Amino acid sequence: MKEKKSIYLVSGEPSGDFIGSEVMSELLKIYPDASFCGVGGQFMEGFNFKSIFPIGDLSVMGILPVLLKIKPLLGRINQVVNDILNNKPDIVILIDSPDFNHRVANKLRKKSFKPPIVCYVAPTVWAWREKRVTSMSRDFNHLLSILPFEKDFFDGKGLSTTYVGHPIIPEINKVNKKDSFKLRHNIKNNPVLVFLPGSRTSEIKRHIKPFRKAFDVIKNQIPNIVLAIPIDEKKKYLVDEFFNDALFVTEKNKKLELFKEADVACAASGTVTLELGLSLVPMVVIYKLDFLTWSIVSRLAKVKFVSLVNLVLNKSSVSELLQKECNSKNISESIISLLKNKKLFLKKKKDLLEFKKIIENNSINPSKKAAETISGIIEGSVT
C-alpha cells in the first residue's frame, strides 16, 4: 500500500467542516503521510490544511439567494475544478453542499477526470428533485450516507453507497458526565431552553424575530427559565442585540454539554436536530425560506416531514413549524406545552430513545468507517 496519498476535500458548511475534520483524523491513521487540500473551515484547518478560499463563500441557502450570488459561485466552482486538476489528487471527497459540489463533480467528469469522486452526506433526493440521482450515479463513484434508510434508496438507483452514520455520534456519547453546564452557570434547578436559529446568516435573520416574541411569552409563564444560544462566534453579532438575557455558547464541546442538560429546544431544521435527537432533547423545529424557494420546494417535496427525527421514525413526533406556521404564537405554545405537559414530554423522550437506537448503528465509529471505505476506494477493494 502506497502511504503517500493526496486527498482533496470540499466542504461548504460548518457541519461539513466538522465531518471533514473527523474523517481527516481517521485517514491519517491509515495514511500517516497523507496531504490534504481543498475547501474547508476551522476544524479542517487543524490538520495542516489551508482552504483555497473562505468556507463562508459557499454558505448560501435558497433559490433566490443563490441566483443573487450566481456569478461568484460559478467562479468558485471553476476555481475548485481547476485546483483539483492541477493537484491531481488520488481521490476527491465532496462533503454536503450539493448545489455546489455536484456541479464540481459534473465539471470534473466532463474534463475526463479519472480518480474516484466520493459524495459524503447524501442530498435529500428521496424528498425532492429525485432526478438528481441520475447525474449523481454518473458523476460519483461512491456515496457515504449518514442516515440508515439512504443506502437501500441509492443502491437501488445505481449509486454504490455505504451507510457510515454521523460523526457527531461518538462526540455526543463521550461528553463527560461530570461536566455540568447548569452548575457552571449556577442554574441548578432552572429549566433550560436552547435556541438554535441556524448556521447561515439568512436563516438566523429569518428566525430571530418570531422566536424573540415567543420567548417573551414563555418567560412570562415560566419566569425562571434560562435561554441558551449556541452560535458561531463570527455570527454572534447577529443575535446579540435581540438577546441580552441569554447565555451564549460558542464552543462545540460546551454545546454538547449544554444539550446533555437542556430541557427543551427550538431549532432551525438541519443537522443540529440530529444532535439534539441523539442528546434526547425534546424539540420544536422551525424553518423559513424566501418566498420563491418555498413555492418551488413545497410543490416538489415528496415527504411529509422535514426534521430528521420525524423522517427516521416515519411519524410526526417533533412539532414542525414551517413558513407561516413559524410564528411567535405557535412557537411559544409548543415550547410551553413541552415544559408543562409531563405526559407529552415523556412521550417525546421515549420517541428520541427509539431514534437514537436506530441512528447509532450498533455503535460503530462513523468517521473510522468512512475513512476505511475511502481507503478501500483508493486501493480498489471498494467500488
Image (cartoon, helix red, strand yellow):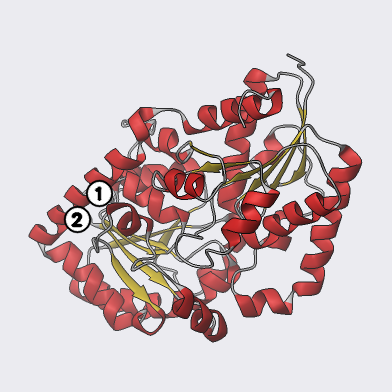
Locate residue 299, reporting x and y percent.
46, 80
Q: Quadrant of residue 381?
A: top right
* Residue density around tag 2, few if under 14, some if 14–19, many if 20 or more, within 10 Å: some
Say above or below: 1 vs 282.
Answer: above
Locate residue 145, reporting x and y percent.
50, 44
Q: On the rendered image, what quadrant is the C terminus found in? A: top right
Locate residue 23, reporting x and y percent.
60, 33
**Relative to the observer, which residue lies in front, 142 or 203?**
142
Whether residues under marks 1 and 2 lie with C-beta atoms below 8 angstroms apart, the answer is: yes
Q: Amino acid at mark 1?
A: Leu
According to the image, label 2 marks what residue? 348
**Relative to the observer, which residue lies in front, 95 or 275?**
95
Q: Amino acid at mark 2?
A: Lys
* Residue density around tag 1, few if under 14, some if 14–19, many if 20 or more, within 10 Å: many
Extreme left residue here?
343
According to the image, label 1 marks what residue? 352
Residue at 39% x, 30% y: name it: 174
Along the horizontal axis of the image, is 143 left or right of 261?
right
Locate residue 237, reporting x and y percent.
58, 67
The secondary structure type at the circle numbered 2 is: helix
Residue at 32% x, 50% y: name it: 277
**Relative to the observer, which residue lies in front, 39 or 357?**
357
